[in-house]
Image (spheres, rainbow, N blue to C red):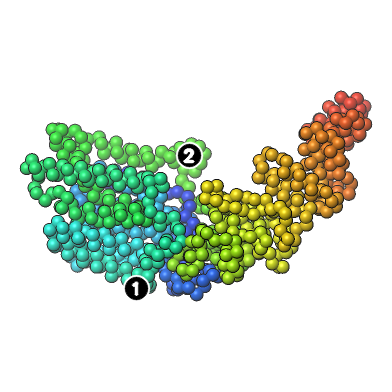
Amino acid sequence: MKVRTALLLGASLVLVASLCLQPVTESDLFFRLKVGQQILADHHLMVRNMFSFTAPDHPDLDLAWLFEVAAALAFRAGGFPAVVWLKTGLVVLALAVAFVACRRRGASPLVAALVVAGAAWIMRDRFVERPHVVSFVGEAVVLAALADLRRAWPGRRVAAFAAVMVLWANAHAGIFTGVLLLGSAAVGWGIAGDRRAARRALALSGVAALASLATPVGPGVIRYLALHVALPRIHTIDEFRSATWRSDAPFFVGIALGAAIVAASLLVARSRVEEGGAAPGSGARALAPELLPVAAMAALGLASVRFAADAALAAAPLVAARATDLGRLWRQRRGGPRGIPATPGSSAAPAIAGALLIGLALGPRIADARAGRPFLDVDLDRSIVPWDAIRFVDENGLRERMYNDFETGSYLAFEGYPRARVFVDPRLPAYPEDLHRLLGDFDLDRDSWDRAMQRYGVQSALLAYAGVNRRVAWWDPDRWALVYRAGDARVFVRRLPRWSAFIRAHEIPATFRFTVETGAETLPLDPRPAASPVAECEWRRRLGDLFFDLDRGKLARARAAYEQALAVQGCLAAADEASLAAWLGADALATKSYDRALSYLDRALTPALKEGTPQTLANRALTYEALGQAGEAARDWTTLLSSSSRTLVQLAKTRLRLLGAMPQQESEEARIP
């Protein structure tokens, strides 16, 4: 490999690595690590769904065991950063082999590097710690093989290809894309009239198909793939949706740009045939072996967005080769060495392109470093799991028979098995169809949902992404108590006698409503559910706290609820009674309702509560002043001279001077150094 070619390849791969070296945001990684750890511990695959209490006997078809073991070993060696580096190595290898495939198709080093970088940019959202990154490597190997089918393949080369296919099959079920690419190419070679190449492509397609069966699952791969076709029809899963312009614009831009380059190449080829400058057969028919595999992968990516990245990778050799042809023709017609060079020469274009790729890779990282952020952060993104909510359920013993969402279930399985089992996790084939139907039904009412939870013996629930999670509205407050509401997580507990004391201490007076237009909406529960063990005065206090949070500065509802909570003296805990009375007194003082303010502040400062604060005492002194009771005000200000708060001591001195009641000689305790 020439130095300039190596530098261009290196620059494009630096950009690829930069796109990969990001914090871990893929929640599926958790269950992958746990499965790999179990395989290493047990020395065999998991054949049953051991992680879940909802379907413990359901078969677990694992077509990614090799990736899971590799990830577990990397995690053992260096934690999450090591797994990120493993993923990065696989993706970089895939794009490096794709570069080789581009060159074998006749692309110049410059164009090959730019096209590979462009493909990586389209693929970047799929550069995550999941086994499909192995499929990128397998697909790149197939693309390199497709570019070399006109030459004879010796037996050792076929054996090496078969070995790669077997490794691919044991790391990810995406090997079927290799069969698709090779089979489409065989049809294309048949159209182009090259029967020998068609037979080679068909034979390699057969090798890949046989390799897909060379796994511990064997023919189960067919059922596994069929499940991935059937399940999205009954259970909406984002990565199985069709590609859309709004969500997947880079993919559509790539399709449009690639199609334009190929179309322009075909038009040029036709014009050259008509001018006598090219041999017949250099048009669309000759391109069929290249066009059909790309068209098949593009159709797959449009139908299921999870394959958009695979389609971008598959298109790279075709686009690079056609772009190189266009560049050569443009240069020839310009009549000189200017333009896009077909091969590296004295042009500065390769150096400029290499510098651009390096700049795109390092620029954002340098900006992060200058802003005080890490230049390279490849650890776990802490936002992907509701840590505080999980800590809450753990501390209070709520993990047994607990409902959870898919993403959270992945972490709970990783962290909790075998101590606790999950309701569900993202291993889709490991769960029966009836559970998928339940989770895919968006029109359930609360009674239907509760019957399902009873059927599975669910006693608690942890929901994440509560703002957009429609299931948050399905927990009937007459049967379920909301006991945690923070961030974007919610925890519910079934109203059972065993949880009565816990609910009394933690219940939040709220339920939820969900609409597609507004998402989840918090609804205060008034009146209190009949089954709630919380006292009415305490319910009112908690309602006030909820109103205070929901109304964002509008205090009318919170004020009314707090006043209702204090209606019966001695009902609340002393600290809560004092706190509410102090807040209501301060609120009344701010609105110049001095008589009300004095009543509440006196209540907050009653010796029986023993919870009065210096700030409450200062508020009462100000209230006394407003009511013209200077003597009582001076008494409270004098008491505050011994406060530990320097600000309040200074305020007390100022007010006493204005009242003419400042002691002639201050004690040493009242002085603030």
Tell me which amino acid carries mark 2.
Answer: Ala
Residue 170, relative to residue 553: is it above or below? Answer: below
Q: Quadrant of residue 159?
A: bottom left
Q: In the image, which is nearer the foreground, mark 2 or mark 1?
A: 1
Q: Quadrant of residue 550?
A: top right
In the visual, does 324 lie left or right of 357? Answer: left
- Of residue 164 and residue 276, the one placed in the foreground of this image is 276
Contact, mark 2 vs mark 1 (Cβ under 8 Å)? no
Q: Which residue is mark 1?
A: 219
Measured in 3D between alpha carbons, the distance from the residue under mark 2 to the one under mark 1, in whole angstroms, is 51 Å
In the visual, does 586 lie left or right of 259? Answer: right
**Mark 2 or 1, nearer chain start:** 1
User: Which quarter of the rendering shows the C terminus?
Assistant: top right
Q: Residue 460 at what x, y percent from top left?
A: 62, 63
In the visual, does 270 lie left or right of 505? Answer: left
Q: Residues within 10 Å of mark 2 (few under 14, many from 20)?
A: few
Determine the secondary structure under disc 2. Answer: helix
Q: Quadrant of residue 343?
A: top left
Q: Residue 494 at what x, y percent from top left?
A: 66, 64
- Of residue 67 and residue 312, the one placed in the foreground of this image is 312
- Of residue 395 and residue 586, the one placed in the foreground of this image is 586
Question: Of all residues shown, which one is farthest toward the bottom?
Answer: 57
- Res. 280 in view: yes
Determine the secondary structure under disc 1. Answer: loop
Tell me which amino acid carries mark 1.
Answer: Pro
Residue 191, relative to residue 435: is it above or below? Answer: above
Q: Which mark is residue 369?
A: 2
